[in-house]
Image (cartoon, rainbow, N blue to C red):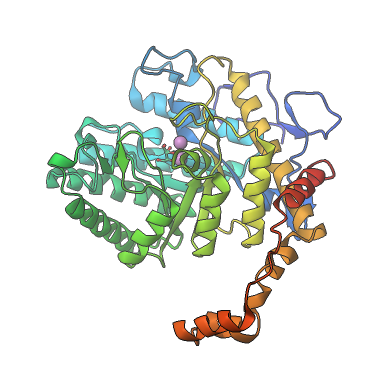
Amino acid sequence: MSKVFIGNREYFPGISQIKFEGNSSDNPLAFKCYDAKRMVGTKSMRDHLRFAICYWHNFCNDGSDIFGPGTQIHPWNEKSDPLAAAEDKLDAAFEFFTKLDVPFYCFHDVDLAPDGANVAQGESYLRHMVDLAKVRQQATGVQLLWGTANVFSNPRYMNGASTNPNFDVVAHAGAQVKRSLDATVALGGENYVFWGGREGYACLFNTDTRRELEHMGQFLTMARDYGRSIGFRGTFLIEPKPMEPMYHQYDVDAQTVIGFLRQYGLDNDFKLNIEANHATLSGHSFAHELQMSADAGLLGSIDANRGNAQNGWDTDQFPTDLHDTVQAMLVVLASGGLKSGGLNFDAKLRRESTSLEDMFLAHIGGMDCFARGLLAAHSILEKSSLAQNKKDRYSSFDEGPGAIFEAGGLTLTELRDHAEVIGEPELVSGRQESIENMINDHLFRA
Ligand code: XLS
Ligand code: NI
Ligand code: NI
């Protein structure tokens, strides 16, 4: 590709198309492992990993935190007219996507377009930006992994969106989700995400949790029905998170969300979007949350990032822990791959990383880390006895009384009688250390 920016201005001058140069390269602006076309089993790395870049952390945030203003100066943020600034931001975003050659991106409605002074104006701003994005998607081949609505930043959502105690606020959330679904469908988005935002509570004394959760079930049902009515054939996703901004978030973790989806009959249309940092905040591991989702047939997509072991908040760092990506890719591969989901880098630069080049370096590192995780996981599944050993561990359920038990054919009394007949079972080693060693051995062979 000779020209990888499509507006009039180049926002990342001096940085050209990022290429695969291999393990021996010491060029920081090159992939060492991610080689989009390389086949791993039956699929290319590109098709296995389905990388996406998020709009918000890269093009909307500027490093500001509660203790101080932004440190990152973005050339697409110079214009004071919000719509003109949004247009510049779009060009910068597509330049970035194409220079990194990722297949997908993700956005909230208010990342792409200004919110507007009222419902109709917000809709028209978003439609305008969607028209421009459509042209850029066609010109570059970059596609939309998912769209979503930001129904947590505007002050009206301080007590939640669909779980707000005020019906008028619920209506505004509905307007935003409607326009965001319209935008997602217009752009051919493969999924549509609901992260709970402020769907939770701070104080039980003033909160009717039963009613709020029913409202959430009702709201999601309406969103599903509307999406299907306008031709959305993709997957709706819920992204669990246990805390922050609310003390108690309703979508605490994967198993909670799975129970909720089943309770409201939404599990045929919805799956889960698992974020690594949210998993660890909920007291689980990233791989655990993926596994619980996969077991339920509801693993939809991934927000790829990592937390900080010392902190109890969502630091949204870029994934650099190889062991983490290996474990994640083991679950993904063993459950049949990402399908319509992808690996969205819901990660931000540190406030101290102030150059535009840092945005590239961070994504290159994350992409290589997952590519290495993919190679190691593939090699482990192909060449080791991991899967067979796991299966063998349950072989007592494959025949005889164990199989009858699994099929629901035993009574508790018969279970007791079996115990009496067989006497004390022998202790069988779980061999955890041996498996952990084998996985480390593969990391250096992959
Ligand atoms: C925040 C979430 C958010 C979702 C999209 O913690 O990760 O960024 O992914 O609303
Ligand atoms: Ni996320
Ligand atoms: Ni997060």
**Res 205 → quadrant:** top left
User: Measured from the top left, where is residue 309 in percent x and y?
Assistant: 54, 30
Instruction: Relative to 3, say whether 211 is above or below.
Output: below
Residue in the image at 36% along x and 38% along y:
243
Q: Residue at x 77, y 46 (%)?
A: 437
Indicate whether 442 appears above or below 72. Answer: below
Q: For ligand 1, give the image quadrant.
A: top left
Residue 196 vertical placement versus 185 (above, below): above
How far across and down, in percent of the image, does residue 339 sit? 58, 59
Judging depth in this view, the residue of 406 and 69 nearest the camera is 406
Q: Is residue 183 left or right of residue 298?
A: left
Q: Quadrant of the C terminus?
A: top right
- Where on the picture, by quarter, is residue 219? bottom left
Q: Quadrant of residue 340?
A: bottom right
Residue 188 visible in the shown view: no
Residue at x 34% of width, y 39% of height: 150
Foreground pick, 310 / 230? 310
**Residue 410 x %, y %:** 49, 86
Determine whether, in the image, residue 284 is placed left or right of residue 213. right
How many circles with numbers are drawn on the protein? Answer: 0
Q: Which residue lies at the image location 41% right of the left edge and 54% below the top edge?
A: 185
Q: Position of residue 131 (x, y in %)?
A: 42, 43
Residue 71 in view in this figure: yes
In-front residue for pair 346/136 = 346
Give the quadrant of the N terminus. top right
